[in-house]
Image: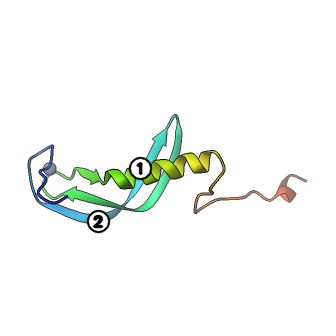
Amino acid sequence: MNDACCTSCGSKDFESRKVEYLYSHQGKYLLVPDTPAEICQSCGTIYYDAKVLKEIERRFFAIQSHREEPEQYLRIPTMAFA
Ligand SMILES: [Zn+2]
């Protein structure tokens, strides 16, 4: 976020950090760890790169349609119900 001002407070002081991003869509959630973000040092507003958000969205729909599995996918053993 070079040369950009915070839209909330106008500060130019940003810190690059990795945060947990919670994507939600129609009551379904995808928690994405290590999401690169820029955090305003004066008011704490978090900004994400549009490319990063696009990739999260792509993964969310891939997981929803079972083309990809989330990192922490818990498979319930079929034996548990036998
Ligand atoms: Zn700010």
* Cα distance in 3D space between marks 1 and 2: 18 Å
Q: Which residue is mark 2?
A: 17
Q: How is the image coloured?
A: rainbow
User: Does residue 65 appear to the left or right of 34 in the view shown?
Assistant: right
State the residue at coordinates (75%, 56%): 76
Question: Within 10 Å of the Cα at label 1, are there few (<14), some (14-19), or many (20+) other Cα atoms?
Answer: few
Q: Give residue 37's position: percent from left, percent from top.
A: 30, 59
User: Looking at the rendered structure, which numbered label has been put on residue 33?
Assistant: none
Quadrant of the rendering where the N terminus is positioned: bottom left
Task: Label 1, secondary structure: give it.
Answer: helix
User: Does residue 30 appear to the left or right of 72 in the view shown?
Assistant: left
State the residue at coordinates (15%, 44%): 7
Residue situated in front as seen by the camera: 63 or 76: 63
Amino acid under disc 2 = Arg
Q: Give residue 10's position: percent from left, percent from top.
A: 8, 48
Q: Which residue is mark 1?
A: 54
State the residue at coordinates (15%, 60%): 2
Task: Label 2, secondary structure: give it.
Answer: strand
**N-terminal label among 1 and 2:** 2
Amino acid under disc 1 = Lys
Mark 2 residue CB less than 8 A from any atom of ligand 1: no
User: Does residue 68 appear to the left or right of 20 in the view shown?
Assistant: right
Q: Give residue 27's position: percent from left, percent from top.
A: 53, 36
Mark 1 residue CB less than 8 A from any atom of ligand 1: no
User: Does residue 37 appear to the left or right of 10 in the view shown?
Assistant: right
Q: Give residue 32's position: percent from left, percent from top.
A: 46, 57
Closer to the eye: label 1 or 2: 1
Relative to 69, residue 57 above or below: above
* Quadrant in the picture for residue 36: bottom left
Circles 1, 2 touching at the beta carbon (< 8 Å): no
